[in-house]
Image (spheres, grey):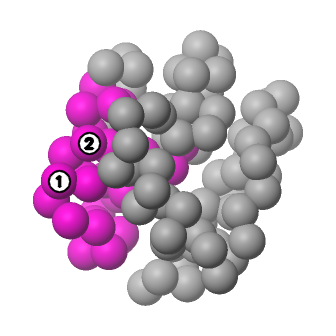
Amino acid sequence: MEQKFIAAWLANREKAERIGVRMRPVAPEEAMKTAKRWLSGHRESDGFGILADKHHLELSLEALVVDKRFTALFTDEECNTALTRLLNGGYFF
């Protein structure tokens, strides 16, 4: 499941780049650690604000975290953090 999450995150990052949102690269072997670090901090993930401005939060890390395919990879607290950020950013499910 981790590999599918990492592949989905990479695909979303590539889609984001096509709409003009550049994000720092994340090495596949560091992806889960990086995702969890973003979720444990107080700042949104890389590119979140720009994705919100462009109405494309579906491409954010936070959107993947609350995706039912991947929630088992994260704690309830991490999922709640992602959901709160998405709702505060104006994301509608």
Q: Compare residues 42 and 9 and report the one nearer the observer.
A: 42
Secondary structure under the numbered disc 1 in the rendered image: helix
For the point 21% across and 65% down, the residue is 75
Dot 2: what SS? helix
Whether tag 2 and tag 1 are in contact, CB under 8 A, the answer is yes
Give the answer, above or below, for where 4 lies relative to 55: below
Horizontally, is 88 left or right of 5 in the view?
left
Percent across and percent down for residue 32 are: 50, 72
On screen, residue 46 above or below 29: above
Q: Which residues are magenta?
A: 60-87
| Residue hosting label 1 | 77
Sort mark 1 into few (<14), some (14-19) or many (20+) by Cα contacts within 10 Å.
few
Q: Is residue 78 visible?
A: yes
Image quadrant in which the N terminus is located: bottom left
Compute the Cα span from label 2 to label 1. 6 Å
Query: In this rendering, would 56 be left or right of 85?
Result: right
Q: Nearer the viewer, residue 37 or 55?
A: 37
Residue 79, magenta (yes or no): yes
From the viewer's perspective, tell me whether residue 2 is left or right of residue 84: right
Which quadrant does the C terminus fall into?
top left
State the predominant SS element of the stretch in magenta.
helix
Magenta highlight on residue 71: yes
Residue 82 place in picture, x, y as percent: 32, 43
In the drawing, does residue 72 fall left or right of residue 45? left
